[in-house]
Amino acid sequence: MLKTLFLHPPSFEGFDGGAGSRYQAKREIKSFWYPTWLAQPAAMVPGSKLIDAEPRGLSVEDVAKAAGDYELCIMHTSTPSFPTDVKVAEAIKEANPQLRIGFVGSHVAVDPEGSLNATNSIEFVCGNEFDFTCKELAEGRPLEEIDGLSYRANGRIVHNKPRAIIEDMDSLPHVVDVYKRDLVPEDYFIGYLNHPYLSVYTGRGCKSRCTFCLWPHTVGGHRYRTRSVDHVVSEIAKAKEYFPQVKEFFFDDDTFTDDRPRAEAIARGLGELGVRWSCNAKANVPYETLKVLKDNGLRLFVVGYETGNQQILHNIKKGMRIDWAREFTQNCHKLGIDIHGTFILGLPGETKETIKETIEFAKEMNPRTLQVSLAAAYPGTYLYKQAQENGWLMNEQDRGRLVGEQGIQVSSISYPHLTHDEIFESLGPFYKAFYFRPGKLWQMTSEMVRDYDVMKRRLREGAEFFRFLTAREDRAA
């Protein structure tokens, strides 16, 4: 085995670019997702090391020094962070010229040739699911024998045949062994999850066809491939033993509730372990399933409502109806299941009127917490193709630009009737309309009074949130 470093490189300060992050950006409140997509191949390579630079506060100089002890470095990249990731690769290569460096992630899977042409410091890039590709690289196999690989040879770029999608998900080892070896749970913050938390995937792929969603379009596919119930429950049992300080486990599958019988079976196994857990869900889970999940430790759903306008839901192929979302949300409130609601501004069909409609819908659904993102046209998604064909992307110089100079998300889409500035400037009013209500303010204050740790955390998050709003208002002015 080559001595292998798996690296999530430093980027913009506070940048959450881990593969679990649905929108790679610096968020309004500090947040870091676990680098699970790198931890998975790291678990397959004996003697490897995983470094997640940004949550650890590591600089380019720090990782360049650390990489000096390795023969192979595999870096995760994203479209927003790719330019800075290239600079990190160049710095590492300069410090250790013999080091072989390759990139993984949706950005290089979609554009392998453009990625390799960006710098001579990158020797190869991996496409789609790259777990076994990384394993074979670490084994020292000749590049031409490795499926799913693009690389340079004799002055040209070679693309090997695509790697077959993984069908036996139980063939992948547990990632919590790598977490235990290389990561610190206290480094990872998500505003709506209890701290410290721990997240894993129990499957890959999503049967929904949302036009904007990055992972199913690029690396996961539209078929939900899952690990067995025993495989999942045994990993959480192990994690509970490894990390007694963890207060919550999160299942980061695109839609954990897509396979309801399996979700119920996993829940019962978790109930026997006595753990608290949360997951991503679609707003169509029936009451009977909700009750089974709640009775077995479920605390919170992350629900992609996206919009309060039915036509926009049709436009983005969400496969959801507003009345389904209302019934689902009412049932969650009845059972005491918390919801973190996510919304997106600027999707096809958006107008000033639909933004107001979505704000009112969010207040009506009244999730415990809320996140508002800007429609992001990631390369490889249907939305990106649609934006190109209709001229919705900004001018050529800014095309594909998803974050600003500080790593904060910017609007990459603009319509004749609704400019990118108007979309961008609606974020602040949305957050204020939702959070600055007497009932919501009272809820947050009550939580702080009951728990001193929550108070400290909420005060920090509140300060970050107000700085975010102020920055938005300054830009708008």
Image (cartoon, rainbow, N blue to C red):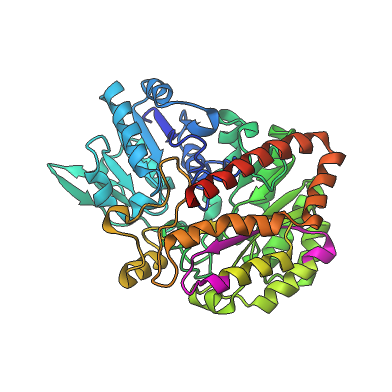
Q: Residue at x 45, y 40 (%)?
A: 406
Q: Residue at x 42, y 31 (%)?
A: 5
157 relative position to 366: left or right: left
Kindly indicate the quadrant of the structure image that contains residue 437: bottom right
Q: Is residue 340 visible?
A: no
Residue 201 vertical placement versus 194 (above, below):
below
Residue 219 pos. (x, y %): 43, 56
Image label count: 0
* Residue in front for this viewpoint, 413 or 184: 413
Quarter of the picture holding the N terminus: top left
216 relative position to 263: left or right: left
Q: Provide the residue span drawn in magenta.
A: 332-354
Q: Is residue 269 visible?
A: yes
Residue 128 pos. (x, y %): 39, 54
160 relative position to 258: left or right: left
Residue 469 pos. (x, y %): 59, 47
Q: Residue furthest front?
A: 477
* Residue in front for this viewpoint, 289 or 336: 336
Q: Residue furthest right?
A: 450
Q: Residue furthest left?
A: 154
Residue 451 vertical placement versus 149 (above, below):
above
Q: Is residue 349 magenta?
A: yes
Q: Is residue 198 magenta?
A: no
173 relative position to 456: left or right: left
Residue 399 pos. (x, y %): 32, 56
